[in-house]
Image (tube, grey):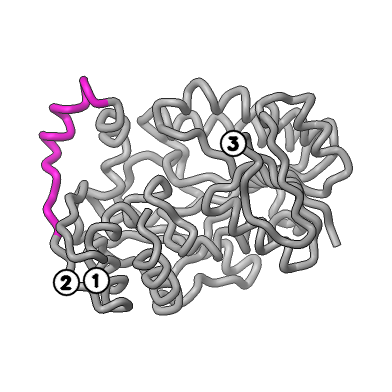
Amino acid sequence: MAHRLVVGAGPIGSALTRHLAAAGDTVTLVTRSGRGPQADDVTRIAANAADPDRLTALATGVDTVFNCANPGTYSQWETEWPPLAASLLTAAERSGAVLVTLSNLYGYGPVDVPLSRDLPLAATGHKGQLRNRMWQDALDRHRAGRIRATEVRASDYIGPEVTAAGGMLRRYADATLRGRTAWVFGDPDVPHTFSDSEDVAALLALVADDERAWGQPWHVPAAEPRTMRQALTDLGAVVDAPTPRLRRMPRAAVSALSPVVPIMRELGEVLWQFERPFVLDAADTTREFGVVGTAWETTVERTGRAWAARPA
């Protein structure tokens, strides 16, 4: 069995840690706090992953470094991501471990077609542009033979581990599963792909050991898209919650608040994802590796019960 280093214990880092441990791997989980899932063969360590010497010491002797980290808020991305990404590259190069990065779909920018991995990385916002620079830096080192790297890109998360910080769906569900009205951004009636957290973890683990995956990005296969309203209705049906009541936050209100409310300014940059169809195309992943997304009914069943039992 392999030795893995997982950086970050958010919903995906935690799901991945459990997935790897269940497969018999030895896992070192690194977070600033030292918290994370407890399981046999999992060692939790409190460390600053942006320190390249410390991270290199932790990566020495491991087979894979998984980057599942994420700065706390959008406003911290520009200051916290560059040193962290540089440290991960350094640790992978010095240790010889494969670098597997968890990413998202911001880098493609606003589009009106399904999001396939052959689309240009044409982000118009700083968050997508930052993720693109991170991938290009890793790809440049991979092509130069300095590291072995790949990237897994997912849509908005759904799954028992997902918190309100992990996606809009959970924020809204915390209201609708309890019979309250949810204020939503964008159009709740356009199709949207949701990525099951277990599917994301499984693909991260798969590409770590398959040389066909290295040097390329991969999209996470998912169930057929649902609208936000449909997803909330399906989650509510699991626990007999009332039909979701949704009120749309006007775009004008977001724009008006942006100069004085930082989170509104950051949200405004990515709202296009909720104002038009946002459909993930992962056909290349399915053709290459034979994996498909978890059935929507399965995802909704375990997620709805977990979210209703544990408010975020």
The part of the chain drawn in magenta is 246-261
Q: In this view, does 192 lie to the left or right of 14?
A: left
The residue to which callout 2 is attached is: 243
- Would you call the spot at circle 1 few (<14 residues within 10 Å), some (14-19), or many (20 or more)? many
Tell me which numbered mark, 1 or 3, is placed earlier along the sequence: 3
Q: In the image, residue 269 lies at what x, y percent?
A: 30, 33
Q: Tell me whether the residue at label 1 lies in contact with that at label 2, contact meaning CB atoms closer than 8 angstroms.
A: yes
Q: What residue type is labelled 2?
A: Thr
- Would you call the spot at circle 2 few (<14 residues within 10 Å), some (14-19), or many (20 or more)? some
Q: In this view, does 253 lie to the left or right of 237?
A: left
Residue 135, labelled with which disc?
A: 3
For mark 1, give the secondary structure. helix
Residue 233, labelled with which disc?
A: 1
For mark 3, give the secondary structure. helix
Tell me which numbered mark, 1 or 2, is placed earlier along the sequence: 1
Q: In the image, residue 197 lies at what x, y percent?
A: 51, 61
Q: What residue type is labelled 3?
A: Trp
